[in-house]
Image (cartoon, grey):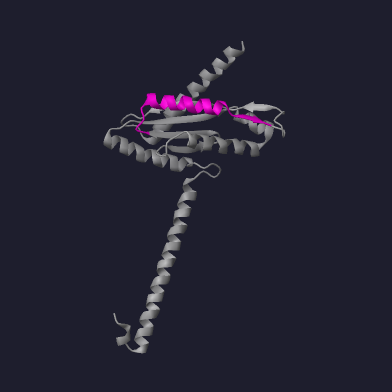
Amino acid sequence: MDLDMLDVRTRAAIEALCDEVLFLREDVDRLRDALSEAESLADNDALCPVFNRRAFEREIHREIALAARFRTPLSVIYIDLDHFKQVNDAFGHAAGDEVLIRISELLLRHTRDTDIVGRLGGDEFGIVLAQATAEDSLLKAEQLAKEVDQLVVTSGPDGSGPEVRIGASCGVVEWQVGQDAQALIALADQAMFAQKARRKSSLQADKQ
C-alpha cells in the first residue's frame, strides 16, 4: 500500500495500527518465553538439574508409545542411594542437598542425551533408556553404581573428620507389552529393593 496516496488522518491511523501490531507481536514473543520458562520450571526438580517425578512419568508414557509402535526395547533403572540418611545426620541437610546435586550431575554425565533422568523423591532417581535391552541396562546400572560407590562425603577443611561413603542400589526392568508407566516404575522399584538386600548381605559377609 502506498501511504503517500492516502490523506493524513488515514495514513496516521494505518501507521498507528502497524505500531500496535508490532507491539502485539513483541508481547506474544514475551508470553511465549514466559510460558517456556514456566513449563521448564514445572518439569524440573526443585533441587536437582533433572526431571521431577511428574515429568519423568510423562516421558515414560511417551517412550512406551514409541517402543510399542516401532517394536523397540525400552528399560528403566531405579536408583536408591545407600547411607544417605547418615549424610544428613552427620553433616546436615545442606550437605545432603549437595550430594543429591552431585549424584544428578553424575547420572547426566554417564547417560546419553536421549536418556531420561529424573528424581523420583528423596534420594531415589530413575533413568529411562530408550532402545536398550535389559542386558544393556544392567551393564549401565553396574557402571553407575560403581561411580556412585566412589563418592565419599567428609567434614573438615582437610577432610580429616568423619566420612560417609555413598553407594547406590539399582533395579533394572525391561518394558513388556501391556505395561504402563506406573507398572514399569513399580517393577523397577521392586528390583531395586532386591538389589539393595543383596548388597547388604554381601557387605555383612565381607565383614565376617
* Position in image of residue 101 (x %, y %): 56, 39
Which one is nearer the viewer's eye here, 76 or 129? Answer: 129
Q: Is residue 177 magenta?
A: no
* Position in image of residue 138 (x %, y %): 42, 24
Which one is nearer the viewer's eye here, 8 or 175? Answer: 8
Question: What is the quadrant of the N terminus in the image?
Answer: bottom left
* Position in image of residue 169 (x %, y %): 51, 25
Figure check: 7 above or below 18: below
Q: Residue at x 64, y 29 (%)?
A: 86
Magenta range? 130-154
Q: Residue at x 34, y 86 (%)?
A: 10
In the shown orientation, is residue 123 left or right of residue 189? Answer: right
Question: What is the quadrant of the C terminus in the image?
Answer: top right
Image quadrant in which you'd find residue 166: top right
Q: Is residue 132 magenta?
A: yes
* Position in image of residue 141 (x %, y %): 46, 27
Image quadrant in which you'd find residue 202: top right
Q: Residue furthest left?
A: 70
Which one is nearer the viewer's eye here, 183 or 23? Answer: 23
